Amino acid sequence: MIGTGIRGIAGRITPKFGVLGWIVGWVVALAAIPSLFVLYSSAQLSWTEWLNLGSTRLPGLLWNTLLLAMLVAIGCFALGVSTAWLVARRKFAGRKLAIWLLVLPLAIPTYVFAHIYSSMLTEEGWLGLTWIFFFGHTIDIPDIYNAVGVAVILSLAGFSYVFLLVRAALLRSNRRLEEAARIHGASPLQTFRRINLPLLRPAIAAGLAVVVLHVLSDFGAVSMLRYQTFTLSIYSQMSGRFDYNAAAGLSLVLLALSLTFLALERFFRSKQRYYSSAQAQIVKAKPASQAELWLIWIWIGLVSLFAFVLPVTWMCVWSWEAWAADYITAEFWGYVFNSGVVSFTAATLAIILAFPIALYHARHPSISSHTFLHVANMGFALPGPVVALGVITFMLSVMPALYGGLAALIMAVVVRFLPLAIQAQEASMQQLTPSLEQAGRILGAGPFENLWRVTLPMVRGGLVSAWVLVFIDVLKELPATLLLRPVGFDTLPVRIWLEASEEMLELAAPAALILVIGTCPAIWVMMRSEKIK
Amino acid sequence: MIDIKKTLTLILILSLFSTLFSLTYAADDELIVFSGRKDTFVKPVVKAFTKKTGIKVLLHTAESTALLNKLRLEKSATQADLFLSNDAGNLQLGSQMGLFRPINNALSELIPEQYRATDNRWLGLSARARVLVVNTDRVKNENEFDSVFDLAKPSLKGQIAITNSTNESYIAGVTVYLKATNRTRVKHWLEGLKANTESNVFAKHSHIVTAVARGRKTVGLVNHYYIYRHLAQHPDAPIAIVMPDQGDNAMGVAWNVAGVAISKYSKKQPLAERFVEFLVSVEGQKLFAETNDEYPVRSGVAAAQAIPPAASYKIANVPMVELGRYRNETIDLLEEVGMP
């Protein structure tokens, strides 16, 4: 009697399984469209065409892409872990400023980095002139149109993800383990290597995973610096030869690569689980000595100089030129508005669509919920141009009436960034105990009221950070926007792209600057919600 | 039990979305031009046209090939009325895909035959020449280079500057050499070129001119206007233009044209034809070409003063339609050789 009673209540705590399942199914089907398009198109390739791809393009592309991913992972590890450790373990003047300086590079898109550094490294550019001042003409100015150059650019643009995750993990970690190691005679370096590093492995792995996925799907920087990765080659197959099947074939390989990588990362992470006891004492940061203070600021200053200060100064100077030359017209503010509209709409839609998927997975973990989650996550591993191609094809054949407006663009960016929204929400839902919802139902709330008054307020933090993450990425999105924007609808990234390809520095700079400024409030919200946790 | 206020908010948000989704951005009486040519070059032309006719024009700028993809996928759903491209190859490929409609004879015949489609589905508007830029400090004898084929000489190892092989002007140039000579010769040439670059190729033509001007390279292969653009900013730069392949039996300089086509699915054909009419008029021709120091294609319209007159040198006798017909073969050859 009692048993069935409890089961009866438990069965009613969430909206009916069937309804939620159906909603999730539909959302996932929508998210799967580009992947289905890739599968369908690559199925059109004959064996000889596959063999041809395999013998001519694949080896070089695999090497280029993996080399780049590895170099960027090393770069982000070095920059992210070192700065996170300094900020979390030492108390020093200007620590808050340092944290901001290390997070803000997230606001600068990779293609802006690439554009700024390639123009600063010419013989008329700031860095070029500095180089000539120091080395004269005897040593050539470093060239960034190669693997190392692209890796440096992408590391500067991406290390903040590692920084954020590792810092959070360091703040959570237990002081006693470190103390025990020190008492047993380990040097600080040994302690770091043998205690901190293994404990940090999940956070580092997660940070590097985000970074590597960004590398695999990056279009802007690699195409500006003409470094042939999968994504760029897929784009050239599409646009140079109009060969969608070969593009799809390459995308399939890239998708397999990303999924293998993700599976590996999950596998290693699941084997490395550490728990801290309830009385864990949070490590207190040690005040830095005078010498340490200098060293810390030299290192953090150097990193943020190249990752944020220099690019932003460049933007400000050239924006000033643009302002003085009256280039900032009403049209320009139109681009700002357009960017805002797309990012706002897409971020809002993405968290609404991600909610049922995350809720379903958190409440009814099963094979089907896992499958849904993985399928929905595939959008992130596909290059933007391919997502765009899939969406155009789908819309024109299924709902041509909606084509021509914003719908296609919004659909594509939502599909691309849905995984971000799902992950952020899922994390907060897993901390929510079902008993709270049960209590709500027992006290007489209907399923919807329960959702509004219990579930939603509890996961608000997760919703906010999901919204912010999607907003930032949509604001910076380039390849899908280039192809899918309505006629005459230019956004900031599109303008940066067009002006940069014309080498119009004065015109690309203000757009980039507004992009950075627009991202700042979003980052602020994210940082604040982190502090509350 | 459901909170009415919240339901209302939900409805409000949903209706906001639906209006956003159905928004379109072009007015009915506006001509929509998909343009693969730089905004700064097209805008003055569009402005002059609107001023003259009162017809408004909406420019949708992107890479030519990306726009062609869009046209190809959208088919009858496209909003484009016209397509502007910097490369005859793209225009010809578009007509082969059946995306354009023929332009009436009265307008087409103003453009010489070799610079337009055989069925008038696109018209060339302005031409650029593929030339050599040399560093005058390093090259004393002007006759040292008289052919693009000289760039493959082993003595020039590490001294030549070319773009990467995905550049559309570069591909078009190679197509012209292929049609003007033969495959064996071009393949042999590319192999020599590849060895001479030492896998150091340039991302942009402007970088090539700078490298030659600074003496880091001796000779580069570029479109002619990049040289004049550089000289406009640095009048004292030690660079000179060399018109290659001018001998009696030589093939002549490779040209490529920027041009225009009318979308097959345009619902504003009369307006679109008026735009083309303006572009091929003497005024339009002058304006279109001079923003970028190019040659107006219509005969009798003079080019900018700074550049060598078209009549003063020999031009390769390859009709522009070949740039589209043979583009894939050129790309195949470039990939076979493994050009960086």
Image (cartoon, rainbow, N blue to C red):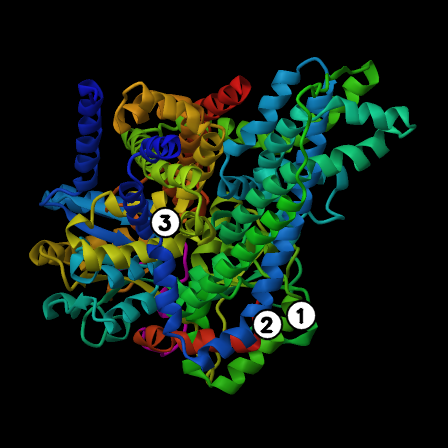
Q: Amino acid at mark 1?
A: Leu
Q: CA distance from mark 1 to mark 3?
A: 42 Å
Using the rendered image, report if marks 1 and 2 lie on a common chain: yes
Q: CA distance from mark 1 to mark 2?
A: 7 Å
Give the SS element for disc 3: helix
Which disc is residue B131 wearing? none
Mark count: 3
Q: Cβ–Cβ below 8 Å for labels 1 and 3?
A: no
Circle 1 chain: B
Residue in front for this viewpoint, A257 or A180: A180
Which disc is residue A480 wearing? 3
Q: Residues within 10 Å of mark 2 (few under 14, many from 20)?
A: many
Furthest residue in direction right, as rendered: A185
Q: Quadrant of the N terminus of chain A?
A: top left
Report the residue at 17% width, 47% height from top. Answer: B49
Circle 2 chain: B
Report the residue at 41% width, 54% height from top. Answer: B306
**Disc 1 marks which residue?**
B156
User: Please, is residue A176 above or below residue A488 in the view?
Assistant: above
Give the SS element for disc 2: helix
Q: Cβ–Cβ below 8 Å for labels 1 and 2?
A: yes
Q: CA distance from mark 3 to mark 2?
A: 39 Å
Residue B150 in view, yes or no: yes
Q: Residues within 10 Å of mark 1 (few under 14, many from 20)?
A: some
**Disc 2 marks which residue?**
B151
Q: Position of residue B339 (x, y in %)?
A: 56, 70
